[in-house]
Amino acid sequence: MKKKQLHAYRREMQMIFQDPFSFLDPRKSVMEIIAEPLIIHKRFKSGVERNAHVEHLMDIVGISRRFANSYPHEMDGGRRQRVGIARALPLKPCSADF
């Protein structure tokens, strides 16, 4: 695939790893981790809109908003797994409607 085709293809699929601690960037907050795909694929023009969407995704997967500025090492395994799920949802893989 060409680079442009691969970029479009990656919007259609997202991976959720079994061990969330190994793929979450320890230098980024939960908010930054979930927002990363939105930034890469330029889904929102303003940071305010993007952050509101990230908070909505946190609500969907059951992560309290008080964890938005937390880092992966500060969370238990279940919450880290939910961060991975929330990170996979913003691009609507498999035409999920969120």
Image (tube, rainbow, N blue to C red):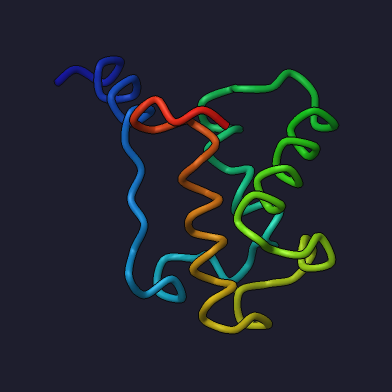
- Which x, y percent locates residue 85? 48, 55
Q: Residue at x 66, y 61 (%)?
A: 62
Q: Quadrant of residue 66?
A: bottom right
Q: Residue at x 43, y 71 (%)?
A: 20
- Which x, y percent locates residue 73? 61, 82
- Which x, y percent locates residue 67? 77, 67
Tally the numbered discs: 0
* Residue sitting nearer the eye, 91 or 98: 98
Q: Quadrant of residue 75?
A: bottom right
User: Viewed as shown, does residue 38 lie left or right of 94?
Assistant: right
Q: Residue at x 65, y 45 (%)?
A: 57
Q: Would you place residue 62 above or below residue 70 in this image?
A: above
Q: Would you place residue 79 above or below residue 83 in this image?
A: below
User: Viewed as shown, does residue 95 lie left or right of 45?
Assistant: left
- Which x, y percent locates residue 98? 58, 32
Q: Would you place residue 31 above or below residue 36 in this image?
A: below
* Residue sitting nearer the eye, 59 or 45: 59
Q: Would you place residue 16 above or below residue 19 in this image?
A: above
* Residue sitting nearer the eye, 67 or 25: 67
User: Viewed as shown, does residue 3 lie left or right of 46?
Assistant: left
Quadrant for the N terminus, please: top left
Q: Residue at x 75, y 70 (%)?
A: 70
